[in-house]
Image (cartoon, grey):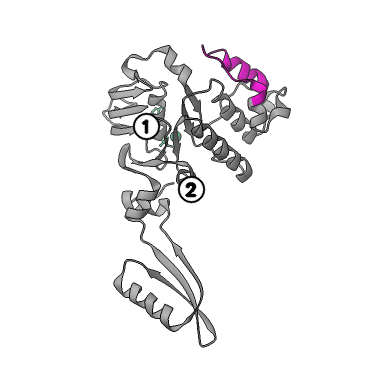
Amino acid sequence: MIKVQNLSHSYKKDGKYAIKDVNFEIGEGEIFGFLGPSGAGKSTTQNILAGLLQLQEGDVEVAGYDLKHIKNEMYNKIGMSFEQSNVYSKMTGKENLEFYGKLFDVETRDPQELLDLMGIGDKADIKAEEYSKGMKHRLTFARSMINNPTIWFLDEPTTGLDPAIASEIKDIIRARNKEGVTIFLTTHNMHIADELCDRVGFIVDGEVRLIDSPKNLKLQYGEKFVDVEYINEDEVVKETLSFIIKEDIERLQEILGKYEIQTMHTKEATLEEIFIKVTGRELV
Ligand SMILES: Nc1ncnc2c1ncn2[C@@H]1O[C@H](COP(=O)(O)OP(=O)(O)OP(=O)(O)O)[C@@H](O)[C@H]1O
Ligand SMILES: [Mg+2]
């Protein structure tokens, strides 16, 4: 659905690249997460893929369209939700969606239905300038669905939202994906990537360092540990042991044979810990 080969982009003529030699492919119906710290090149990549930033170097194919020769009909298939809500403040929520819907040559969704879905249906006739930040974000998100896109670009879809709204947005993303929508999600929030993405790409300083599924990454990089609590002479003792280190495995066997176990939990490295391990960088 998306094919990116040797993609590079420079905003300046000084030869400094915002992204350099980026390669990846995204299959139809996949949720792909692009993860990296601020300034890594996530939005730059996304903007090129969505046809908002002109392709300079490399080959990019989106929904069968070669981005060297963008055809307007490509935009009918794309939805894009920006990190910063950029809705028209003098228009009501509904007018914003009606206006935006007219830009497409395909059947669009009912604005009221989308506003209802986002929980701001009762604000449909209020000007967007009177919306709170979270409401504006929901309006931007609703707008990105107006043309029933088959490829959906989501830039930090849940950042800065309260947990209840973030959770609703995640449910909507999952539901759309079940209907076959391909999703390109950029974030520096590892939790949302872990929860939603089939595969993730780690990007740092404009370069993609690694691409794999969260599950494989955890299997490959995440050392498994077990927290075990047992009773020794009326006292609860807690130890954290690795499944990989030989002495730890032996110690665990010893504990299991010798003491009364109170609790035992396995835990694996988080995506965030793996990101730091692989890239040597924090995610902020
Ligand atoms: N319009 C622009 N003009 C010049 N430089 C830019 C422009 N937009 C981005 N850059 C630079 O390109 C690099 C990548 O920026 P980009 O916005 O793609 O990062 P990002 O990963 O989306 O970061 P964030 O998490 O902060 O959104 C940065 O060094 C940034 O300063
Ligand atoms: Mg960005």
Q: Alpha-carbon neighbours of circle 2 within 10 Å: few (<14), some, or many (≥20)?
A: few
Quadrant for the N terminus in the image: top left
Horizontal arrangement in the rendering, residue 23 relative to residue 179 (left or right): left
x, y percentage for residue 220? 32, 54
Whether residue 257 is in magenta: the answer is no
Q: Residue at x 59, y 32 (%)?
A: 137
Q: Amino acid at mark 1?
A: Gly
Tag on residue 191? 2
Q: For the residue with label 1, is its CB less than 8 Å from the closest atom of ligand 1?
A: no
- Ligand 2 rendered quadrant: top left
x, y percentage for residue 232? 49, 85
Q: CA distance from mark 1 to mark 2?
A: 22 Å
Q: Secondary structure at mark 1?
A: loop
- Tell me where the magenta segment starts and ends, as one range: 91-113
- The residue pinned by badge 1 equals 27
User: Is 268 in front, or is 274?
Assistant: 268
Q: Earlier in the sequence, mark 1 or mark 2?
A: 1
